Image: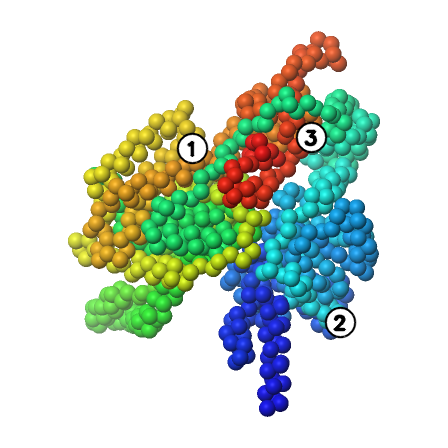
Amino acid sequence: MAANSDMSVVVEDFIDRVMRVFPDAEVVSRGESIVRTNGLSDQGRAALWYAKQGWPVLPLHTPRSGSCSCRKADCQSQGKHPRTQRGLKDASTEERTIRSWWTRWPDANVAVLTGTESGLIVLDIDPRNGGDESLADLEAEFGRLPATVESRTGGGGRHYFFIHPRVPIRCSSGRLGPGLDLKSDGGYIVVPPSVHCSGNTYQWRDSSKPNQIQPAPLPGWLLDRLTQQYERIPADEEGGGNIPEGSRNEALTSMGGRLRSMGMTTAEIRSALLEANKGRCVTPLDDTEVERIAESLGRYPPRSSIVTNSSEWEHPIPLSVTNLPEFPTGALPDWVRQFVEAEAVATQTPPDLAGMLTISACAAAIAKKVVVHVREGYQEPVNVFVVVILPPGSRKSAVFSHVTSPLEEYEATETERLKAEIAEQQSQHRIATEALRKAEKKAAEAKWDKREAAFEESNRAARELAAIKVLQPLRLIVDDCSPERLSTLLQEQGGRIAVMAPEGDVFDLMAGRYSSGGPNLGVYLRGHAGDQIRVDRVGRASEFVESPALTVGLAVQPEVLNGLTRVPGFRGRGLIGRFLFALPHSLLGCREINPPSMPPQVKSEYRKNVQALLSLPFGTDAEGAPAPHTLSFDFLGQEALMAFASWLEPQLAATGDLGHMTDWAGKLVGAIARLAGILHMAEYVREKDPWTIPINLQTVELAIQIGHYLIQHAKVAFGEMGADQELDDARHILSKIQSLGVTEITRRDLFESVKGRFKKVDKMDPGLGLLVDHGYIRRKEMEDSSARGRKPSLIYEVNPLLPPELNCCRSATQKERLQGTQVNCANCANCATPT
């Protein structure tokens, strides 16, 4: 009895340890002392949990009795450096990747990326170097740190986790004070249950675990100190590298503007710029040119010394739409709507994420099973290209996993069901291949009197081999897949497959960044349109896919969009125009800590209905070959679609609202038809033959409702991608003005700072005009007395209601938005309306 009691204590201690390390560990039965570990170590399970929060993780080496698993005798970072080849670049939230790491290295320490990717910034207190005293001094002056996620390090220190403020903040050591380090952009932090070289483990502090409270916003005073220190990096360090010939004036003007905004005199600016010119410019400018830049900037008063009457100015009008509509969940069939809304609550994510991804999941389930007859001679398939844009830490991977799980489960079940049959066919194919090889060899060596019979035997073996059809294991979803492999998979899978991933690597693969041949877009373009794919490669069998149906569903970070239209072929060949974009508001900073989970019935209904769509039979053509069923509109549904097309057409004119993005808007009627087909099939999934029921008026109206939502989001997406040149120029100019920290600037000096982008002064005018129209700057004439006979230079005054360049405080405004208040901040060019 005592032995059983001792064992119970041991097991209970083990359970408590797992629960401390991995807050979501699932205890099946404490009475029976069972803990579900899914085959992973404590470190591996913890890493999976962190990844589900949107925190990219990385395996680190492990300390081993005074040494390190890296086996370097002089290792100075035992248990704290990455095991993977590319270090931080390998950090991931992908479950499959994480499982493979901790299966290979079960005792690997766990690191979480800091900075914009994870949305975390961490204050590291090292008491051995005076960290406690330094923090006490700061708190005495500015107030105590807020309650936030906190861990105890194996070395006796503390880690305070805060929400990254979305402004550039570098990792630093000792800048805030002795023993105070900062882990931010480009850094990582060791997290529980990692083991310190002392043998102690990292642990979450009681009541401050990440499953109990959320990271707090970075205190304002701490943000001020960090951004001031970031701005005050010496001129010879700023930028870090050499300045090429084409960027000398711009770089030195920008550097000098920052120094002037910090209050430096003209002489101090001149000295700093002359030093930077000699030390960093590949071919230094003449000293007189550098002095001219310093004198020019010295004419402007430093920002800190100006008292401006801001009442003369109005708040600027946003350069782009910021109050984007929320995804219309009411347009979805009930079982889809209930899942999307419950998923949004359970994961504390915007409904747009689950809404758009479920559309792509349903499209993947019915691709090539139905097509939509729009009018005589025109039909649309039902596959779609979807991309949702959200910042790091927004739980994209978690939602993605929940949305796609019915497809993955169905795929696994079908693969298991067909495993024996496939094995038999493969065996028959190998036997027939060997028989053909022997028959050909016999025929080649046969004497004249026996050659005819040998040839016949060879031909028979060839026919038998050709008659054997080997089924391929079912593949519904791929993620990390090259265009070449994708065309092969489409052929193997009967012309349909879905590329679905919670990362933006797919765009890199499209762009050919991992191959020497450049962008290979053909499979995506034809896969979306349903055009034949014919591939002939040297040394490989030809591939032919009739009417392919490729579905794409992506959830990516905002930076993936930047400059996407400038990737060769992406816009010119129509790839960008095929995507349906969603840019929902992020809920970071205002999420519920303990939201209700998804009701089991809702989850079950979603799973059953998606798999019911997958189980629907293909149609057949006159010869009995697989062919899609045809969906048709009823009279009122057809009229509604044509009415939408009539409304849309004038918008496509050069002067129309969508004239700058006709590559996208010109496909919108077809996208609405596809959406109507998807909604119809989801609505009637339980009917015997849903393709025999016409698409009615209500379904078309709901598809059009989603279409109007997509229009507004596409406008912003195209602006973010740089597709609107005037808007892109205006943003670039405004960013430069803000970085200079000036209250006014001449047109001539502004050109000096941006001429790396604009080759002539007048090329700035459209962007400047847009900034004037939107109230960011205003014109005034100034007589230039410094150069006799010189034409007066136009001066632009900067709106004082626009602070120095900062990112929008979306977390605060989102919280107010959820409370029913429509409000934006005035901190950035995209979000500058009265608060």
Residue 661 circle label: 1
User: Badge 3 is on which residue?
Assistant: 740
Looking at the rendered structure, the kind of residue marked 1 is: Met
Q: Which residue bears the numbered disc 2? A: 66
**Label 3 vs label 2, nearer the camera:** 3
Q: Quadrant of the C terminus?
A: top right
Q: Say above or below: 428 vs 810.
A: below
Residue 643 at what x, y percent from top left?
Answer: 28, 33
Q: Secondary structure at mark 1?
A: helix
Q: Image quadrant for the N terminus?
A: bottom right
**Where does residue 681 sit, x and y in percent of width and height?**
29, 51
Q: Earlier in the sequence, mark 1 or mark 3?
A: 1
**Quarter-wise, where is residue 470 in the image?**
bottom left
**Residue at point 79%, 56% (across, down):** 131
The picture places residue 388, in percent across and down from the top left corner, at 46, 46
Label 2 SS: loop
Q: Secondary structure at mark 3?
A: helix
